[in-house]
Amino acid sequence: MTLRPFLMSDKDDGPGSEASILTKAKTRTQRPPMYKVLLLNDDYTPMEFVVHILERFFGLNHAQAFEIMLTVHKKGLAVVGVFSFEVAETKVAQVMDFSRRHQHPLQCTMEKE
């Protein structure tokens, strides 16, 4: 049996005739790659400023922000969140710009998950 597209002019001539089947290829969409946003420790940015950054730009409550700030302080860096490329890029730019405007050397980067 050969498959061919079904045409409007095709008729079912009753039993014994070959019926054509309209086939449709399924496509799977892939999830976009995700990116981790990281805060890096330095010896100059005040802890309170880091907490403020985490609350303001990442929507964390005070306890969550304080916990991540301590991780950055103790381990040298911490993942603040995982986002699509555009969102991660925007968050990094916001943090870096805000830090520079307040004369702090805080570093924020992103890397593919």
Image: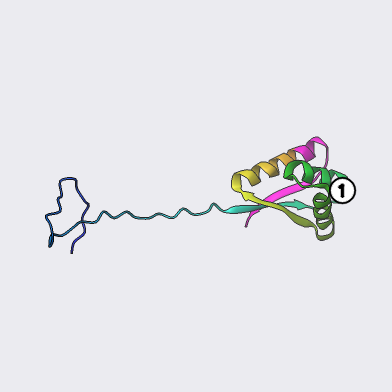
The residue that disc 1 covers is 47
Q: Nearer the viewer, residue 9 or 35?
A: 9
Q: Quadrant of the C terminus?
A: bottom right
* Residue 36 x, y percent position in the rendering: 66, 53
Residue 109's place in the image compared with 19, above or below, is above
The foreground one among 37 and 2 is: 2
Residue 33, horizontal then vertical, whole percent:
56, 53
Q: Amino acid at mark 1?
A: Met
* Region of the chain picked out in magenta, as a range: 98-113
- Does residue 59 appear in this view? yes
Q: Quadrant of residue 89?
A: top right
What is the count of numbered marks? 1
How far across and how far down the image is residue 29, in percent?
A: 46, 53
Residue in the image at 76% along x and 56% along y: 78
Q: Does the magenta-highlighted stretch encompass residue 100?
A: yes
- Vertically, is 17 above or below 60? below
- The residue closer to the viewer here, 2 or 52, is 2
Does 109 sit left or right of 112 as displayed? Answer: right
Question: Would you say residue 46 is visible in this rendering?
Answer: no
> What x and y, as percent, mark residue 38?
72, 52
Judge left or right: residue 81 versus residue 29.
Answer: right
2 to the left or right of 103: left
The residue sitting at 26% across, 53% down in the picture is 22
* Quadrant of the image occupied by residue 74: bottom right
Specify whether residue 59 is painted magenta. no
- Helix, strand or loop under label 1: helix
